[in-house]
Amino acid sequence: MSIRSKQRGVSFFSLMIILIVAGIFFAVGMKLFPVYWDHSLVTSMMEELVDEPETKKDSPTETRMKIFKRLRINQVNLPVQDAVKIDIKEGVKTLTLEYNVTVPMFYNVDAVVKFHEQYEVIVR
């Protein structure tokens, strides 16, 4: 066996498989990135709202108006209007953010991304 008969490096076929797999992961990442970016904006907005002292005094309607005003300012649209639920029980205001986003991937394949966050504000 001579040195010339030994294979060195990556063959064209294996290089193409690596590039195809990397391309699929890149395409999926690029389609899911905007969904997660919007969710990070929503969570940071909700955390700021929870930290404000006025949130303790606001009624659920006022709190909901503040949330949707901030969403409009940040140009974020929640997929459903009922994504934010506000409950007040025993001196604790609970803000629940729960929604799903369906992202079309390839042909007839969709990805469903579920988000569920809960924030508490002590009213007392």
Image: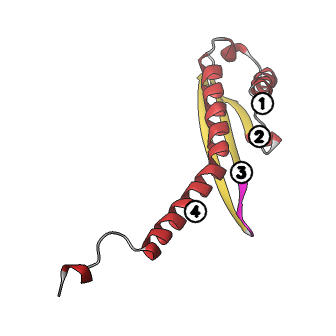
Q: Main secondary structure of the magenta part?
A: strand
Q: Quadrant of the C terminus?
A: top right
Mark 3, residue position: 101
Residue 65 placed where, x, y %?
81, 24
Of the pair 78 and 7, the residue shown nearer to us: 7
- Confirm whether the magenta stretch covers residue 47: no
Q: Which quarter of the figure has residue 89?
A: top right
**Circle nearer the N terminus (1, 3):** 1
Give the mark nearest the N terminus, 2 or 4. 4
**Could you classify mark 1 by the number of other residues whose Cα lies within 10 Å: few (under 14), some (14-19), or many (20 or more)?**
few
Residue 78 location (% of width, % of height) = 77, 40
Quadrant hosting residue 45: top right
Disc number lying in front (1 or 2): 1
Circle nearer the viewer, 1 or 3: 1
What amino acid type should be assigned to the residue bearing mark 4?
Answer: Ile
Q: What scheme was used to colour the molecule?
A: secondary structure
The crowding category of the residue bearing disc 3, from other C-alpha atoms within 10 Å (few below 14, some 14 to 19, many at least 20), is some
Of callouts 3 and 2, which one flags the residue occurring earlier in the amino acid sequence?
Answer: 2
Alpha carbons under labels 3 and 2: distance apart: 9 Å
SS at mark 1 in the image: loop
| Residue that sits furthest to the left in the current view | 1
Q: Seen in the image, is 18 located left or right of residue 8?
A: right
Q: Position of residue 101 (x, y in %)?
A: 71, 51
Residue 24 is labelled as 4
Q: Nearer the viewer, residue 37 or 119?
A: 37
